[in-house]
Amino acid sequence: MRKYIVVIFLGIFALSVSSSPICNINQELNKDTAAKLSEFRGQTYSTCLTCADSSCQLKAWPEEKKGDEAVCKLLFCTPSYVSKFFEKPDNVESGKTKIEFSYIINSKGKIKEVEVKSAKGAMNARESYKYLQSFTSKTQFEPLVVDDKAITLINLEGEHIAYTGKYEDIDKNMPVNQGIWRN
């Protein structure tokens, strides 16, 4: 009986220490990294991914190996292109919303199957979904190819802070600093 309790305790502890990596969808790869991506990916498939059939998922990493997790996230779930233009949902209050969601990156490098897990702030879950659909529609990842076969990356977790409302120049009410430029 004690063995079972110890095994259960260690299993729960391991799950609480390991966590699914959270990928950023709003930061794109720099050009140098994007150019060498396939070379680096080839060296880290078995380290970073668990694959089955035509899909892979990122491995969970314990707290003490966050550096390894960061490298895997950079190589496998960082976009190569992020559009700067997207539509905000109609009739949304001005404010900030923290959106937690899940998604996949299909074999063509596009975000699909977005599912909002929570939305805290100015937008509700439905508005957050519309926002994410617009925001991610033009986001592009380098397709994942393993053994000359395009692979889907599944079970990805994302977190995004969305700012809504009209854009206003934050310096519009500040007095002009006459001391900086003098002719």
Image (cartoon, rainbow, N blue to C red):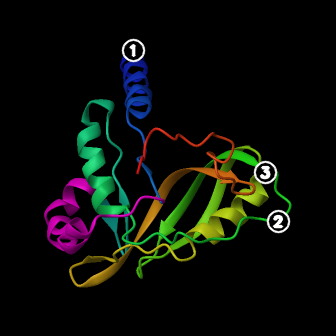
Identified at 78% across, 59% down, the residue is 126
The amino acid on which the numbered mark 3 sits, given as a three-letter code, is Asn
Residue at 61% x, 45% y: name it.
171
Provide the residue span drawn in magenta.
Answer: 26-49
Instruction: Indicate which disc, 1 or 2, sits on the residue closer to the N terminus.
Output: 1
**Quarter residue 174 falls in:** top right
- Amino acid type, residue under disc 2 in the picture: Asp
**Residue matched to label 3:** 124
Q: Dot 3 lies on which element?
A: loop
Q: Residue furthest bottom?
A: 148
Q: Residues within 10 Å of mark 2 (few under 14, many from 20)?
A: few
Identify the mark at residue 2; answer none if there is no mark: 1
**Element on which disc 1 rests:** helix
Mark closest to the chain's N terminus, 3 or 1: 1
The disc at residue 138 is none
Residue placed under numbered mark 2 in the picture: 90
Give the secondary structure at mark 2. Answer: loop
Q: Main secondary structure of the magenta part?
A: helix
